[in-house]
Image: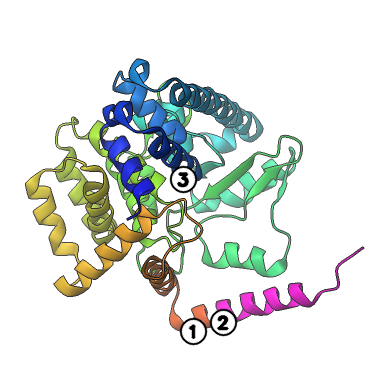
Amino acid sequence: MDDAARALLHALREPSRLSGCPPLVLTELLGRARNCALLGRLAARARRAGVMSTLHPRLAEHFRAALIQAEAHQRMAKFEINRLQRALGALGDGMILLKGAAYVAAGLPAAEGRHSGDVDLLLPKSRLPAVEASLMAKGWVQEYQADYTQDYYRLWMHELPPLRHATRLSVVDIHHTILPATNRLQPDAAALIAAAVPVPGLPGVRMLDAPDMILHLAAHLAQDGDFSHSLREVVDLDDLLRHFASRPGFWAELLRRADHHRLGRPLHYAIAMSRALLDTPVPADTILALRHFALPSPLDRLVRAMMAASLAASGRSAVDAPTRFCREALYIRSHWLRMPPLMLARHLGRKSLMRLQAALRPSTP
């Protein structure tokens, strides 16, 4: 772990440490936080801890700017949710917001300082053709036009191809479940939808229930192949676990849902990373129960070490050889989990051919 990563993790765990940081360390920390899309989140934690007035004036300026920018992003996200409701009408009734859109709409701690991007929705699969047609009739267009990419999303993935609004350029991802259809793990989409809860202040809009929200985040964190910017997901997990821990019976329900959705192993690794990097408080009996989902001991330690090294290097494009090996190994692992071997070979072969054709295509003057 390099010095900038160590300083950023210390600051995320204890924002008061920022007050005594030398200027050179602060400069490196700010750069890393910005590259990880965590500058606003770190600023929010410093504000929450009441240490803004003790910070170096230049650091405080950066933090205030990041918070203002995050608030602007969140206003846009809320506006997009409103536009989607308006465009879909009855088709969108009961739509479920996922990830950042849900955090922002519900005012969860994971929204503080967050720069929201795409709006992610979850709807029953049977409703998706009508929803897609309605949005395309009202200003949204296909983000990807290639036949292969369209087929890839529609046949293998857990969502439709992304739709981008023609004038606002906002993107909406419409899901019918939370992991690809080819994934070895298949959560119960109907149960996720049935357990969803209303978003306060937004009639007709819902979000995943607390345990399912954690499991969705854990599934992506533990099985995603790209760890170059995934530290922000660990921060999300830390914020959500600390927030929901006060809910009676939360930990027992989380384990029960993990078992039902067959997501115990991703939850084990996600919580292991959150505890290792951010000291997330988790009851001892929950940690013990999660060990039953782990890989055999030597392999378990190896996976956890590779994940921790890759997550600590978030925001870095150039990394040392061991970290690069960890990233590549986790990338291969993610594809192995995502697709059967023959399908994976066919997919990677097709993508390689498409890249080669693009490289050989004459450029236009």
Q: Disc number at residue 220? A: none
Q: On the image, numbered disc 3 is attached to which residue?
A: 36
| Above or below: residue 171 compared with residue 295 | above
Side of 171 relative to 332 (left or right): right
Cβ atoms under marks 1 and 3 closer than 8 Å: no
**Residue 303 counted in the magenta span:** no
Q: Is tag 1's residue or tag 3's residue first in the polypeptide sequence?
A: 3
> Residue at the top extreme?
53
The residue sitting at 43% across, 71% down in the picture is 328
Amino acid on which disc 2 is placed: Arg
Tell me the residue that label 1 is attached to: 342
* Residue 351 within the segment the image draws in magenta: yes
Marks 1 & 2, CB-CB < 8 Å contact: yes
Front position in the image: 200 or 280: 280
**Which residue is the extreme one toward the right?**
365
Can you tell which mark lies on residue 346? 2
Task: Specify the quadrant of the image occupied by residue 198.
Answer: top left
